Amino acid sequence: MDTGRTPEGPNGPGPAVRSAAAGGGGPSAPVDPPGGPGGADPDAERRRGVRRMKLIATGFLLVATVVYAVSRWASGHGAGGWAGYVSAAAEAGMVGALADWFAVTALFRRPLGLPIPHTAIIPTKKDALGASLGDFVGENFLSAEVVRARLRSVGIGARLGGWLSEPASADRVTEQAAAALRGLLRVLRDSDVQAVVGEAITRRAEAQEIGPGLGKMLERIVADGGHRRMVDLVCARARDWLVEHGDSVMDAVQGGAPGWTPRFVDRKVGERVYKELLRFVTEMRDSPGHPARGAVDRFLGDFAVELQSDADTRARVERLKNDLLARGEVQDLIQSAWGAVRAMMVAAAEDERSELQVRARASLISLGARLSSDPRLQAKVDGWLEDAATYLVTTYRDEITSLISETVAGWDADQTSRKIEAHVGRDLQFIRINGTVVGALAGLLIYTVSHAAGG
């Protein structure tokens, strides 16, 4: 896995890698992804920080080494007892620095390129780490109990109510909703929506038998006397038409008379028929209790019953309905309904003072006030949110955790190691620095105790 990699020393990459990074690159060089000058790669600055910290940590090791060499030389040339203390501290500091260098390096690569067991942990255990990370997230963040407890502690209902009760917040929500509505209306093509609406209305109308419903509605209208205004209107319009077109009525009667009757007789008959027809319509208009009105009431009542119970009448109504729906004019009318609705919605979404936006804003403020003051409503909202979040978590937890593990598994091992090192390597170098300092202090303490105990 790591064969062929350039060995590393305590100061990070070996000379070959450093020369490749500084010069022309190479197979083992930590080459930044292309992005042009100026730090387009977000990890480039982090990697530079890691290299600086490596130099600092290595500087501590070099200082400990120099101090150890000087103190040993001074001890051999009669410098006194202090040289032993300094030598012991420096020696322990070197040991601590080397041990922590080995530990930090072993996370990302094989120290000195040697195939030492349990090193290069991240590259070799990447897939296992991804699976473990997915399981960890699933067990500790995507469990129903955790989600419910977290949402309950937040108190979203009360917070949402307090936020919505502010006019500025209601204005913001209304503005965003109007913008979303405008965007949706721009995306939708009128022809597609009209076809869908027309098909939906036609299919629903064809599947639903309208006879019984019409019968019940007509029965209630007749029982309440709601049809009488229509009868009044028809009678009034019929009389006005007769008054305006009297000659046409008399001509029609005379034209239907036999050819052998004298003309003056035909004229008298026509005038008589016209006067009787005008008298009948006038009396029907002016008399609410006219027998003809009663006949209309009985006809409408009987027709309402037939619409509900007579199979032949219902079948005829269905045929009439289907014939009307099949006409192109009716289909054009149904499809044109979307144009009217769309125009109304666009106008309302663009006008901040439209009735729709004013009512929406007022409703949001009212809802916010209720939410902020009604504990029962808050509990309901919190319960709905908890149930929805719990459903999503329990239903899609496996997909979420598998997304994590599969994403990690798809990463290149070396690139993953470099990316993780770029993010945490700078802090890990403090382990080396601390190892040098703590090791020196521990060595000094051990030497002091041993020296005091021995003499």
Image (cartoon, rainbow, N blue to C red):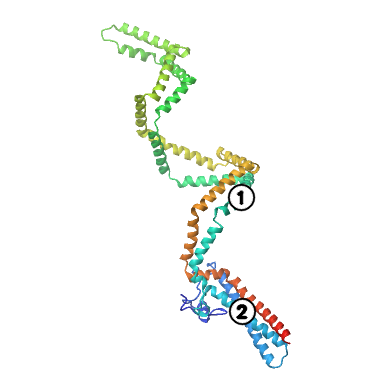
Residue tagged 1: 152
Left or right, 329 with reference to 132 = left
Q: Relative to 424, does residue 215 appear above or below in the rendering?
A: above
Q: Where is residue 445 in the image (x, y as percent from the top left)?
A: 70, 80
Residue pushed farthest left?
260
Three-letter residue code for mark 2: Ala
Circle 2 crowding by C-alpha within 10 Å: few under 14, some 14–19, many from 20 = many
Q: Residue 313 carries which label?
A: none
Q: Residue at x 50, y 45 (%)?
A: 182
Q: Residue at x 56, y 72 (%)?
A: 47
In the foreground, 156 or 165: 156
Left or right, 162 with reference to 4 = right
First reached walking from the N terminus: tag 2 or tag 1: 2
Marks 2 and 1 sit apart, C-alpha to C-alpha, by 49 Å
Residue tagged 2: 97
Q: How many marks?
A: 2
Q: Relative to 62, does residue 166 appear above or below in the rendering?
A: above
Q: Position of residue 30 (x, y in %)?
A: 51, 74
Q: Quadrant of the C terminus?
A: bottom right
Q: Relative to 5, does residue 164 appear above or below in the rendering?
A: above
Q: Which residue is drawn at 55% across and 48% down?
A: 387
> Does residue 44 show up?
no
Left or right, 7 with reference to 445 = left
Three-letter residue code for mark 1: Arg
Dot 1: what SS?
Answer: helix
Image quadrant of residue 68?
bottom right
In the foreground, 410 or 293: 410
Q: Relative to 116, does residue 221 appear above or below in the rendering?
A: above
Dot 2: what SS?
Answer: helix
Image quadrant of residue 79?
bottom right
Circle 1 crowding by C-alpha within 10 Å: few under 14, some 14–19, many from 20 = some
